[in-house]
Image: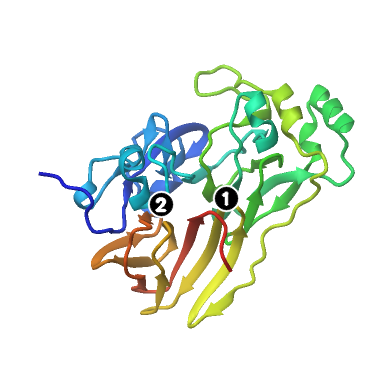
Amino acid sequence: MFQFPPLPYPLTFQPRFKERVWGARNLERLYGKALPPGKLIGESWEISDRPGDASVIANGPLAGRDLRWLMEHHAEWLLGGAAAPGVRFPLLVKILDAQEALSLQVHPPASKAKALGGEPKTEMWYLADTQPDASLYVGLKRGTTRADFERRLQDGSVAQCFQRLAVRPGDAMFLPSGRVHAIGAGCVIFEIQQNSDTTYRVFDWNRVGLDGQPRELHVAESLESIDFADFEPGLLARTAKLEGKTSVRPLVNDPLFTVDQVELATGETAVALGGQPVIVGVLSGNLEVCCDGETEEIPAGGFCLIPASAGLPTIMHADGPTSFLRAIPGGSDD
């Protein structure tokens, strides 16, 4: 008979694959993911607590139950502190395969989302793989006014209002709600975001969707959401620091989440302290994650979630040169 709680252990999940008109098959090539045949897969939802899209636990005594069940019945075991039962897990984690450009879009800021009928969405991107000419559209070109933007919306040239940045593997970008953006063609991205699925499309390159019809635009909502003072934001710094022998590159420290990139040489270890949930996403190499005596092997393209109730420090050991993202809901205390 099942009894809760089990000892905390690194939770892995079954990916949820999303067909997209701009997707491809690179998640199969890069990470060996078992994609549905004949489909253009643009998104792999790795850790999700969205309505109708809750991630199913793939390993250990909780296998077969989903993240929604865990949050409804045992949120404190997972999140720590005084987590209220039934709240949503605060983050949504994906891998995106954009082999055509996504729509030019924006997510509503917290101050306006409710009035617009949506949810705020702050996110970050890590470029895991890129084609030689890959780029991102992020923020407005300096000096662009709302009047300029609206005029170019009318004549179909609104992409000229966006800053376009050439990107390569290892680049990363922070996208607070209200920042206009689009992923350009030829990018595979690890995305860590606020738990939201509200996107307002400004322009979609005059293409049709999977159903052969033009995709819906949300021009009025977009104009209410765009931060028209957000000019030419830069990519996140590549500067890393040493924590013992471990190389740590701070990426994001926001009230919603903290993300670092961690590099381990062969045989080296990193430590995550208990008391807070930790998401680990392996970019390259292979990572052994040991939590309260239970070990899970996480390959490139794989993720695990370490519960806050882990009583001992979680040890992450690299079999070979390994790079991974470490994400924690909420800001860092550092």
Quarter of the image for the C terminus: give it: bottom right
Q: Is residue 226 above or below residue 190?
A: above
Sequence order check: which comes first, mark 1 or mark 2?
2
Lateral position of residue 249 relative to residue 182, left or right:
left
Determine the secondary structure under disc 2. helix
Q: What's under tag 2, amino acid-wise?
A: Leu
Q: Dot 2 corresponds to which residue?
A: 79
Q: Dot 1 corresponds to which residue?
A: 256
Disc 1 residue crowd, few under 14, some 14–19, many 20+, Cα 10 Å: some
The reply to whether residue 203 is visible in this rendering is no
Q: Is residue 173 above or below residue 43?
A: below
Spatial CA span between label 1 and label 2: 14 Å
Residue 166: % across, % down: 69, 54
Q: Which numbered tag is attached to residue 228? A: none
Query: Which residue is situated farthest in the front direction here?
Result: 82
Lateral position of residue 246 relative to residue 120, left or right:
left
Determine the secondary structure under disc 1. loop
Q: What residue lies at 21% left-to-right and 48% top-to-bottom?
A: 4
Where residue 254 sits, quadrant-wise, is bottom right
User: Would you say the residues marked 1 and 2 are in contact, meaning their CB atoms lie under 8 Å apart?
Assistant: no
Residue 122: % across, % down: 61, 44
State the residue in front, 123 or 41: 123
The reply to whether residue 286 is visible in this rendering is yes
Where residue 72 sits, quadrant-wise, is top left
Query: Which residue is situated farthest in the bottom direction here?
Result: 244
State the residue in front, 195 or 141: 195
